[in-house]
Amino acid sequence: MKRILISFALALGLSAPMAMAENACTGETPCTIGDRSYHVLPPDDWDGHSPLPVLMHFHGWGRTGLHVTRNGRVAGATRRRGVLLVAPNGLRNSWSFWDDGDTRDVQFARAVLEDVAKHYPIQDGAVFVGGYSFGSAMAWRFACEAGNDVDALLGISGTLFGESHCRQAPREVRHVHGTADTVMDFPFGPGGDTTYPVALWRDEYRCTTGTRVPDWQQVDFLTFQRTEWQSCQTGKVTLDIHPGGHFIPHGWVARQLDELLNRPFSYP
């Protein structure tokens, strides 16, 4: 997808400075596509020319893309790391993701990325898609239907059912979930298996046994237990779990972006 998006933008003859001059829909002003809209937030200190990594983040139920651009744990992370944040607005503040297939919101998200590519230079190899709660499940659905050119899925506290079918898959999956979550319940597996939240992707990538790596923290009051599956036929999977409930964990998005972009770890 991203190569198609980039070539599409080039075919239109759009240069970054010209596009930026014409693009007035940044921050709190939504960009419109037909009767739908999204928000976009460039990183701090962007020079207006350099290609940007992109994080398209789907908001939780009852929220909007504007909430995403104001969220310090998401927007705060992208702004400091040179990442372009894209935050679509769901119809009636929700998403269509339960059913397999190219849903209306998958099609809308495709259109959002196409529109973004008209206005911003997108860095090759750095298209990330994520979300929180219902938005996380929507990100999973998008990855299942349009993930072949997505470089990483960043899911937070929301999954699809294990029996869902994925026509496509991103290059890697990173997911975080709290074991005390009772909103989008932590999906324990048989016998209380805490690696079950990513069973769909482990099966999709045909992974073998996961490896526990050292616990890590971004803040001293929240510890993550991490399991990695890197011996897969395609792709790789990372699962972070914590003992908390339903929230965007402090520093989690920041840490994933640092790792994906080969940056020194920092907080916030």
Image (cartoon, rainbow, N blue to C red):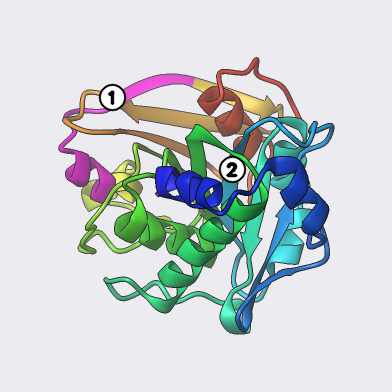
List x then y, in percent, for residue 66: 76, 64
Give the residue displayed 24% in from the left and 58% down from the top.
Answer: 166
Residue 72: which disc?
none
Residue occupied by mark 1: 230
Residue range corresponding to the magenta coloring: 199-214
If the image is split into quadrants, where does the C terminus sit?
A: top right
Depicted 196 relative to depicted 99: above or below = above
List x then y, in percent, for residue 42: 75, 45
Give the residue displayed 63% in from the left and 71% down from the top.
Answer: 89
Q: Is residue 250 left or right of residue 257?
A: right
Q: Is residue 90 left or right of residue 46?
A: left
Image quadrant assignment for residue 140: bottom left
Residue occupied by mark 2: 54
Marker count (numbered): 2
Q: Amino acid at mark 1?
A: Gln
Depicted 37 relative to depicted 206: above or below = below
Q: Earlier in the sequence, mark 1 or mark 2?
A: 2
Q: Amino acid at mark 2?
A: Val
